Image (tube, helix red, strand yellow):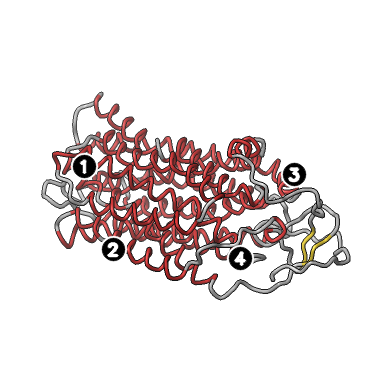
Amino acid sequence: ARESRGLQSQPPPEEQNYGATAARVRQGPFVPVSRNGPAKRDYPTAAVLCYANLINFMDWCIVPGTLIDIQKYFELSDGDTGLLQTVFILCYMLAAPIFGYLGDRYNRKIILGAGIFFWSVVTLGSSFISESYYWIFFLSRGLVGIGTASYSTIAPAIIADLFEEGKRTTMLSIFYIFIPVGSGLGYVLAAGMADVTGDWHWAFRITPCMGGLALVLLILLVPHRTQRRTAAHRALSVSGTIRVAAERPDVHRTAKATWCQDVISLAKNRSFVWSSLGLTAMAFVTGALGMWVPLFLYRAQVVQGIVPPCLQESCNSSNSIIFGVITIGTGILGVVAGAEAARRLRKINNKADPLICATSMCISALCLYIALMVAQTNILSTFIFIAFGELFLSVNWAVVTDILLYVVTPRQQSTAIALQILVSHLLGDAGSPYLIGIISNAIQAKNAHSFQWNFWSMQYSFIVCAFVGVFGGGFFLLTSFYIEEDRKEAEQ
């Protein structure tokens, strides 16, 4: 057993660790926990979840990676094109709380398998839709969003249950590295398949095959049930002991609260609320960038005379490939740097996590604003500042998730993740691609149609993202005011 039953003398009061590494909790009777490492099968399970996360985000970015071709194929305006991604995100976020509720109460492996199978089949089917049935293509993206919600809601909670002590931050960091890696590979795959085959539809036929492999690996390597750890297991300290209030014999700790009770409890958790709003700002910016940057760069290059306007069947996709590579590189570096910075700074400041997020958001907003301003004159500088903007955004991914995991009680974590997905997408990347598109449409409608105004309309629309990034930094700063109190509350 991973937990012994006896009592142990009190550890020194200065022992204060928290988050993915350990937990600082109130004094009381103490329960020792052995420092045995994860079971050998836990690592293959985590590897399967990381692989599925890779495919998940590859599928997200196939549409932006072939956006110019799709826009021309279905004859869509900027506003309609942005709505394509909005439909996907809306369905994703509406399904997330449902899967969060199911994940807290029913078999997670079955839910994951069903979700992977569903989104793979729908993605494959969407590759056979003709230009006359664009509304079916919109519908298919919404259905894919429902399938991916089942995965994104449950997988992080499984990893948190499998690993303890310092390994949880490491494994969550690895898991979240596959967000930018998968996103970047989605751009590269989509653009590469369009170039090789001359038909963008083929980009939608690769990830379903990879999804089939993920389903087989899930069946073979992931245990049918994973142990849902108590607060004691989640709150391990570096010394290998935990400090939790003694369990009252007359209280049944595994009693399930209703979903409404969980939501009310989470709404009172100020650290959860403010960090979720900070994540919402991140989602707004990343959603807009992910959808529109390749097209924005293409229009900037047309204005500069670097590339000709796209008139042929298959458009130039080099920007999607370059942006994909940037996304992969900055994503890996940012997630690793964020996790390491959090690990080191927690030792000297209990508020380090939200302060790291606040600082990185503000720096990212500045870099993105500079990139927009230099795009018409220097495309290389634009790529460089976009890369720095993405780098500082990526710093926050693992840190934000870790904040949730130590300010929310374990039995509420799947629901908390689901609600965070709902809010961040509802107010973030569900609307940002469409908002950028309709602002661009409005600017174009008031001016003469030209390649110059096509570029300016997108440039002016993107400025919204820089301001939202600054607001996100403010939300994380507010999180730092309450995080210590809410962490103690979660450890009771």
Q: Mark 1 highlights which residue?
A: 71
Q: Mark 3 highlights which residue?
A: 485
Query: x and y percent of residue 31 in the render?
Result: 80, 63
Q: Nearer the viewer, residue 191 or 374?
A: 191
Query: x and y percent of residue 240 in the render?
Result: 75, 69
Which quarter of the rendered picture does the N terminus lie within? bottom right
Q: Visible in this render: residue 366?
A: no
Q: Mark 4 highlights which residue?
A: 163
Query: x and y percent of residue 193 in the render?
Result: 21, 60
**Which label sits in the foreground, 2 or 3?**
2
Residue at x 42%, y 64% (from the top left corner): 51
Instruction: Name the kind of residue labelled 2 in the image.
Output: Cys
Q: Mark 2 highlights which residue?
A: 209
Q: In the displayed structure, does residue 366 sit left or right of residue 456? A: right
How far is disc 3 from disc 1 in space, using C-alphas? 49 Å
How far is disc 2 from disc 4 in space, using C-alphas? 30 Å
Instruction: Name the kind of residue labelled 4 in the image.
Output: Phe
Q: Nearer the viewer, residue 76 or 39?
A: 39
Instruction: Name the kind of residue labelled 3 in the image.
Output: Glu
- Give the image quarter of residue 384: bottom left
